[in-house]
Image: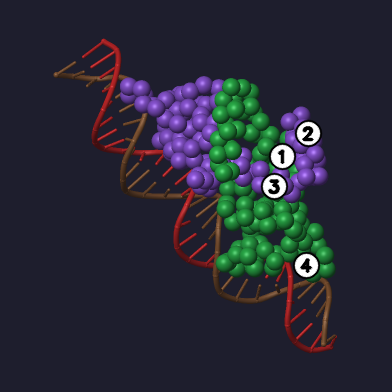
Chain colours: A green, B purple, C red, D brown
Amino acid sequence: MNMPSQPTFRALADPTRRDILKMLAAQDMTIADVSGHFDMTRAAVKKHLTVLSDGGLITVEARGRERINSINPQGFAPVLSWFEYFDGFWDDRLSALKSAIEKDNT
Amino acid sequence: MNMPSQPTFRALADPTRRDILKMLAAQDMTIADVSGHFDMTRAAVKKHLTVLSDGGLITVEARGRERINSINPQGFAPVLSWFEYFDGFWDDRLSALKSAIEKDNT
DNA sequence: TTCATGTGATACCTTTTGGTATCTCATTAA
DNA sequence: TTAATGAGATACCAAAAGGTATCACATGAA
């Protein structure tokens, strides 16, 4: 029943795709919308969107001749559950990790 | 002050490297130790360890002619803090996400 | 209908990536 | 001192990844 997590990790590995996810978190966008924010061809953006879709991180819905790309929160589950594996080993180190996150966000 | 997160995301993108991290979570290991668990050359494993080190996910300490590889919990901070960006957008969807994680772990 | 627009799909190119083979160096044991 | 052992470094290779260029197709507006 577990989704394979590899396509999701792979989708997150590229900085352009992570930027796209941030944009889609703010609002749904067509491919043309997304392309307008990057210095690359629409075809390249389309490829990134396909990878994101394969990773389950976005969903695509047709509306007329447009394709609405939306972020899919559930798609993050495989990654987050993978991280949870380590919780058991970090009983005492976990607080150090959390403070590290605080610093990183400063 | 922010560490660049790209090397970390990149390090996590490979399934072999994620397996190595799980092994190192259980116990520190030399390169030979890690290599014993995979059907690939020591040189290939060494490359993976270098990528993990570049991503800040492990630390390496010399002990005699051996190199002890240890997991570095703080190294996960850039990734976890990246995920936190989305929390603001998922105020209401967050519960759906969490239940999705539960399912994924079943 | 006619034409512009949003998208899909394919071929092609360059760089990166994951892997092997091989040689060398440093350290430890005999 | 002399092996044997653990590891680093380099060259090399095939496949995957990120990108462009280009053509085809469906939909909406005039």
Left or right: C5 with respect to D22? right
Q: Which residue is mark 1?
A: A77
Q: Where residue A16 sits: x, y (%)?
A: 59, 56
Do residues under tags 2 and 4 come within 8 Å of each other at their CB atoms? no
Would you identify the image quadrant in which residue C22 lies?
top left
Name the element at disc 3. Answer: helix
Mark 2 closeness class: few <14, some 14–19, many ≥20 residues within 10 Å = some
| Residue type beneath disc 2 | Lys
**Residue B103 got which mark?**
2
The subunit carrying tag 4 is A
Q: Pointer 1 and pointer 4: residues touching (CB < 8 Å)? A: no
Q: Are marks 2 and 3 in contact (CB under 8 Å)?
A: no
Q: What x and y, as percent, mark residue C8?
A: 72, 64
A56 or A77, which lies in front?
A77
Residue holding disc 4: A66
The answer to whether the residue labelled 3 contacts the one labelled 4, judged by CB atoms less than 8 Å apart, is no
The answer to whether the residues at label 1 and label 2 have Cβ atoms under 8 Å apart is yes
Q: Position of residue A4 (x, y in %)?
A: 68, 39
Label 2 vs 3, first from the N-terminus: 3
Q: Secondary structure at mark 1?
A: helix
Residue plotted at (55% across, 22% down) = B26
Q: Amino acid at mark 4?
A: Glu
Point out the image quarter for the C terminus of chain A.
top right
Residue annotated with mark 3: B86
